[in-house]
Each structure stands twice: as structure tokens, then as C-alpha cells.
Amino acid sequence: MTDPLLETRNVTKHFPLSRSLTQYFGGEARLAIHAIDGVSVQVHRGETLGLIGESGSGKTTLGWLMARLHTATSGELLFEGRDVSRLHGRALRKWRQNLQVVFQDPVGSLDPRQRVWQIVSEPIQAQQRLSRGKLRALVAELLPSVGLPPDCLDQYPHEFSGGGRQRLSLARALSLQPKLVILDEPTSALDVAVQAQILNRLVTLQRESGYSYVLITHNVAAVRYVADRVAVLYLGKVAEVGPVRSVLEHPVHPYTKALLAAVPVADAGRRRTRYQIKGEIPTLIRPPPGCRFAARCPFVIERCRVEEPLLLPVTAANDHVVACHRSAEVGDIPPESLLATVPPPAASA
Ligand SMILES: Nc1ncnc2c1ncn2[C@@H]1O[C@H](COP(=O)(O)OP(=O)(O)O)[C@@H](O)[C@H]1O
Ligand SMILES: [Mg+2]
């Protein structure tokens, strides 16, 4: 396989707590939220890497680190083999042309006072000075590729539906023909039919233009449909990575098994029972040593609490790796044993 397009090497992101919060938690030295801790993942050219995990597992933080919207506390970010973790100023702006981020909330990320042509051409304008006529022509050419009519140039975001606004965000992200697009929950705010249209569009665009995607989502069906490989994050660490089919059909890490089992199946729309993974999520302020899932794992042994598991291959092809001391033994456990039911009206996310 060729060099990855983007690679994180042992990347860490800690958000320091304020002095007063540090005191509240009884800390002496300044405490921090360990949002991402030692993550190494690769994105290859033309592929989609899915990033899944419960809310708070660090997906967005990792996406922001990849786009250099955050600077890592430690570790490296390589793009086409070059270390870009410490770029700043003009060099950072220039490098950013390679990559764009699409956020979950198409309302918050679009300026309501700007017209379509202004919004979509914003990344172009940040890089070069072009006449208004030229910008409008470029945008008119771009809109059909995301399924919008070319004659909506002078409309405002509020004139579009949720799906329409997300198409606008997508057009804006693609306006500079980036090599990589980081999609952070791009369809979570949309209804199911519109989600499918947007995902289809993403797949088509990738086939036509060779974009690489990082698809951050808690929607396992979307990952199954769009992604080539998937990384499972738990509390700032990678629990399991591999080809989508291998990870989703044969998950090995007890956390991945639980996460997949907790997903309501497609035809279960009417089923009232909801599931969640048993046990409490430990704090990211003083993350446990050893395996971060130890406190919730039914297979826990003493070693899990003291020694951090490394990511090791579980297939002969070496492309499916898992960080679990007991990966060879967990086998075919009924995933229900990892889950507790949530009474209907009670807990909601
Ligand atoms: N800017 C920030 N300042 C402090 N804590 C943050 C910040 N961004 C994220 N976090 C914390 O980092 C952890 C991971 O968050 P996030 O990356 O948003 O997870 P996810 O996208 O998987 O839900 C959470 O505990 C969150 O509260
Ligand atoms: Mg997020």
C-alpha cells in the first residue's frame, strides 16, 4: 500500500482545567481533560475512514486535530509524509487548502446574512482574489455536483431545508477541491431519507473526484454504507481499527461488540426498548491506567486494570487490530450481556 495521505502518530490532546476546577477536583498540579490520548490512525488516498464511538469519546477532537483546528498537546500529524503539526501562519493557511471540514450543524456553520455564492466561495476568497463574476460562475458550476440548482446563487441559507443547507456546506467544502474532507456527523441533524441522499452524493463525489473522507458519526449504518475502514474510539483511545466488513461483522473488542449491539436494528423502529452499555463512563480527568474500558467490561481481569493493551493484529492480513488483553478469548459472547435496557421515556442522549 502507498503512503497514507494523512497520519496521526501518537497524538494527544489535553484540555487544561481552570485553576478553580482543578481545586474542585482536589488536584494540585493543573488537571486536564484527556480528550485524545496517544492515537495513531491513517487515512489513505481515496478512502473513507469511519470514526465511531459514544458521545464524548473524542471523535470531534480527533477530527479537529487532523484539520489543525486544534494543535496537539503532543504527537505528530503527517500529511503526504510531511510533519504539519507545528505549521502556523501563512504556511498553515496554505496547507489547509488540502482539507476541509463539514460540521454537523448546517445552521450554525452558515452565515445567515450571506448569499449562496458568497458562502460557497468563501474558501476560494480566502486563498485568491477573483472578481465577483468569476466567483459566481465558479459557484454556479459547483452547485449541481451537490444536487443544488445553479440558479440559487442569490438565496440565503434560511430559504433552504436542513438537507439543502448541508449541501451548501458540502459545496463550500469542495470549492477548493481538497484532498481530504472531514465530515463531522454530517447527516445527524437530518431526517433519514435526506441522510441517504447526502450519503449517496458523498459516495458519488468520491468516485468521480477521488476525495478521501474521514466520516465521524455514531450512525453505524452510515459507516457500513460509506466507509472502507473504521476506527472505534473509546475515551480518547483507539479500541479497534480495520476494514469495515471485518470490524462490523466480526468485532473483537468488547467495547465494539457492545457499541454495535446497542445500535437499534433498522426494522426496529417500533421497538420501544433502548439499550446502553452497562456501567459508568470513567472521567477523562484522571483516566484509569490500563484499559479504559476495564470498569465496564465483563471480561476484565487484573491485568486489564494495570497494563494498557496495545493495538495488535487479529487477522492473518494484519489489517484488523484490537487493543484488548483478552482478544483471543472473548470470542462469541452474546452482546446482550454487555448491555442494559433503558426504560423508554427516561434517559435520552
Ligand atoms: N474545547 C474543549 N475544552 C474542554 N474540553 C473539551 C473541549 N472539546 C472537547 N472537550 C472534551 O473532550 C472530550 C471529547 O469530546 P469530543 O471530541 O467532542 O467527543 P465526541 O465528538 O466523540 O462526542 C469530552 O469530554 C469533551 O467534554
Ligand atoms: Mg462530536
Image: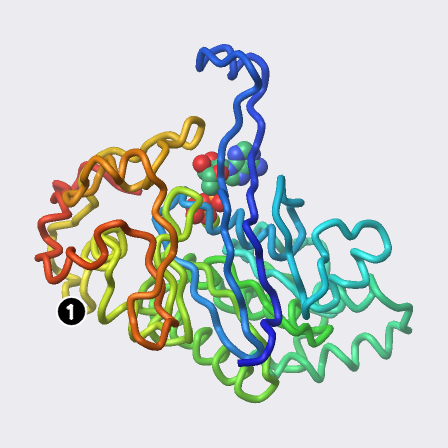
Residue under numbered circle 1: 267
In this rendered view, identify the residue nearer to me: 83 or 87.
83
Residue 225, image x, y percentages:
36, 76
In the figure, 226 relative to 257: above or below? below
Above or below, comparing residue 130 to residue 251 in the picture = below
Instruction: Check the image and name the residue furthest to the bottom.
Output: 208
Indicate the quadrant where residue 232 lies.
Answer: bottom left
Q: Is any atom of residue 166 visible in this view?
A: yes
Query: Which of the two residues, 296 or 175, is positioned nearer the viewer here?
Result: 296
Q: Residue at x 58, y 19 (%)?
A: 18
In the image, is 272 to the left or to the right of 117? left
Residue 115 in sight in this render? no
State the image quarter where residue 218 is shown. Answer: bottom left
Write the residue at 27% across / 56% down. 256
| Residue name at image x 11 percent, y 62 percent | 332
Q: Would residue 272 appear left or right of 280 to someone viewing this image? A: left
| 176 sits to left or right of 199 | right
Could you tell me the amino acid type at mark 1?
Asp
Q: Nearer the viewer, residue 186 or 231?
A: 231
Residue 191: % across, % down: 36, 64
Q: Position of residue 251 (x, y in %)?
A: 24, 63
Q: Residue at x 86, y 77 (%)?
A: 133
Secondary structure beneath dot 1 equals helix
Check disc 1: other Cα within 10 Å, few if <14, some if 14-19, many if 20+. Answer: few
Residue 260 place in picture, x, y as percent:
24, 59
- Colour treatment of the image: rainbow
Please identify the quadrant where the C terminus is shown.
top left
**Residue 310 vertical placement versus 214 (above, below):** above
- Please give left or right for residue 90 compared with residue 313 in the image: right
